[in-house]
Amino acid sequence: MNMPSRLLAASLLASAALVGVASAETTLRLDETPIGELDPAKATDYADSILMFNVYDTLVIPKQGEAGYQPFLAESWTQDGNSFTFKLRPDVKFQSGNALTADDVVFSFDRMMAIKSGFSFLFDNVEKAEAVDASTVKFTTKFPYAPFVAALVRLPIVDKKLVMEHLGDGEGEMKDWGQGWLNLHTAGSGAYSVVSHDPQAETVMAKNPGYFLGVPAVAPDKVRLRYGLEAATVRTLISRGEHDISSQWLPPEVLKSLSKDGFKLLTESGTAQLYIKLNTAKPPFDDQECRLAIVNAFDYSTGIKMVAVTDTVSQGAPSTGAIPVGGMGADPDAPAFKQDLEAAKAHLAKCKYKPEDMNVELSWIGEVPLEERFALLLQANLNQIGVKSEIKKVPWTLFTEQVTKPENTPNVSQVFVDTMDGDTDTLLYSMYHSSAGGTWMSPEYLKDAEVDSLLDKGRASASEAERSEIYKALDKRLIALAPTIYAQNQRAVFAASDKVSVPALEDPAKAFRVAAFGFTFRLMEMHP
Amino acid sequence: MSPVVRLLIKRIATSFIVLVGVSMLIFTIARVIPGDPARIALGPNASTEAVEALRDKLHLNDAFVVQYGYFIADLARGDLGQSLYSNRPVTADIAAYLPATLELVFFAGTTMILIGVPLGMLAARYRDRPLDHAIRLFTMLGVSAPDFVWAVILMLVFAYFLPVFPIAGRISDSFAVPHVTGFLTIDSLISGDLAAFGNALWHLALPAFALSFAGIGQSARLTRANMVETYRKPFIEMALAFGFPQGRIARRFAFKPSMIPSLTVIGLDLASMLGNAFLVEQIFAWPGLSRYGVAVILRKDLNAIVGTVLIISAMFLIVNIVVDLLVALINPRIRLSQRSS
């Protein structure tokens, strides 16, 4: 072969290789617990949230690396007393090709409130939504309600025109509000569209070429979100290079072995906490001294070691109060809780109940085996101060029934709670306001006028700085009242291959303060 | 009327009564499991009013007998209700997940018969010799450990240390098999895609073998015991005396009478795989009905629980009827007893 021919052949090969690289489709494979709920008005779980944040868009999104919210589908918003007015971006189209208008926003709100499922409770204090014009929408709350903007992170906007074409059987003008259709189809404007969906097996998604912000070329072309994989299966799939990101529900031992094999660990923190809740409505924890005794007796550092994955990564981090570290009102300089047996004994001596007469029920949720370890730890700690206790495994369904009456609620319950929309009000109002008792979030049945007053002020104030101060005061009051053991900040840990970068879960400066928002696929990078 | 047809009619009639009994039993049991299905469906933060509204819609506030009446009326129209777990009609869920489980059970059952029965025959033929001891040890292992243990062991050996088999799903992503029956092996053959057929079989290998392991052990042990018993019968001694070759004696004279009791047990094993497949489906991410059944029980999804249990019971009864018919066909004494009754 002569020189020109060789050059020609070489350039052809090089071009072919380049074309091959350029056209290689990247697929991100990850898993979560079933089911994958595709209807955004019914979404509640982590998997649902991942779908919601990628297939649909919202008026605002959480700011990256800091607290607060920024406009997204909205260009801007204004607040005037009880009303919030949003100006919509003019360039957003749904995946169907329909333009996004104020009517779609109003429809999405009305639909969520009519179905009354999922995150609709976040909008219980909203009176109405109305379209001022095609690009302006106004929400009116029942009273000045600052957490409303945060709640909008959980109001995905659906394509009204498309849904109306697919109404199923039902009563009234709106029939089933398109629930039957939206179980398996989507009507969003998100960066990813659904290619196929089986709520028990997997959802396959692909880039939306018409996305209003464009989707970076390095983001995964295709995503396979699998449901209900066993830990052993995930372990094997990742090792074989057939899976990219595990769920956060892998046992620490499996995460540790994957880390040993060279896989990286991604973390999400600042959104949730383990609350060990004390029933203040019945003995012995109707006595504040008894509560302070158990709060001081709990061994916080052992609790964190119990969920350690490696020497540097743990599924728990020290807690400083009722608000997860970094949340609005959390004091960054506050000391972390520590076990203090002397203080525990001193408080116990002041308690009106004698330790020898107590038999504390320590419950744990049957579906969360990790909680059994915390129940055993607390039992050992109570033994150290001479208090007898009894561990009870309670299925979640039974627990949610038990807590509806204070007399049936166990002395001690364990619940992992996340802020859902990143606002401290969403977390604390449902736990500690005296009107909120009787749910899975409030088995404390706390009744305290000062706490109620601070919670009411916190949601009414329009000033971020003022709200922060109010929640700091609330945090101090709650620590003094001790209705709860603030056991540890929860840190979700995921094992991942080097084929993918997830900045929001790898760099705290790029993290979002809303659970699952870090799984925004368009912000990820694939390395084929 | 032929005795076999009479037997068939009798079995169908009793199966119908069993199904009615199962429906009442499971309808009751599903409602006494702790927890409010409406609360679970709507999520922990749903308002009390929303939960009450859903309870009304589901007739959960009505008397038990009234609820059962609604259920039977819907069932008569072929409507098993809506699943609160998947938000789809239960019939749609069953249609989506049942073929995967049936395909898995069919291949596990075939593996069980093709390996278990010949092993039993070999063990009987070489009774008390090293081969017999080796087979008995192997079968003992099969029956002494549950399916999911074998599933994990197979996954470790053939997917982790020696990555030769796939471990999740029914077929690789690169294949798109048109949906006809829901059985990927059949659908791939219908579409003439032999590569997809091979890929589906490749995916079936580990879960089917894991699910069949206990059955292999049981059928081999049973076949061996029955054949050993048959080998003691005078007609076998007579065949030996006539000098027939061992292979011919085993196939022609000993096998058929030995299989009559084995067939019933193999049939029961096959039927029980439908329910037992749960953990194997879970480990191999197999989108089947057993996995769905357990998920709906945990979510107290009343309609789906009743629908799934009814379908699995119906499958169990169908397998039993088929086995009874096969036994009647190969055992003249049953045919005669039907005729005389």
Image (cartoon, coloured by chain):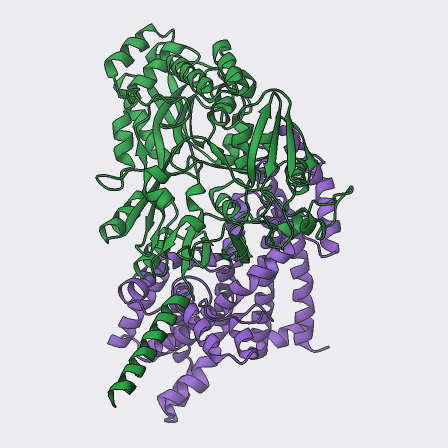
Chain colours: A green, B purple
Quarter of the figure with the N terminus of chain A: bottom left
* Residue at point 39%, 93% (across, down): B242
Of residues B52 and A19, the one drawn nearer to the viewer in this rendering? A19
Residue A415: x percent and y percent? 43, 30
Of residues B228 and A506, the one drawn nearer to the viewer in this rendering? A506
Residue A15: x percent and y percent? 35, 74
* Residue at point 25%, 49% (across, down): A259
Q: Is residue B129 visible?
A: no
* Residue at point 53%, 75% (across, down): B188
Q: Please say if A98 is above or below B236.
A: above
Of residues A431 and A84, the one drawn nearer to the viewer in this rendering? A84
Q: Is residue A256 left or right of residue B145?
A: left
Q: Residue furthest right?
A: A172
Residue B312: x percent and y percent? 57, 58
Quadrant for residue A28, please give it. bottom left
Quarter of the figure with the C terminus of chain A: bottom left
Quadrant for residue A26, please give it. bottom left
* Residue at point 71%, 47% (across, down): B71
Q: Is residue B129 left or right of residue A152?
A: left
Residue B28: x percent and y percent? 62, 43
The total of numbered circles placed on residues is 0
Q: Is residue A57 left or right of residue A181?
A: left
Q: Please say if B3 is above or below A97.
A: below
Q: Is residue B151 left or right of residue A118?
A: left
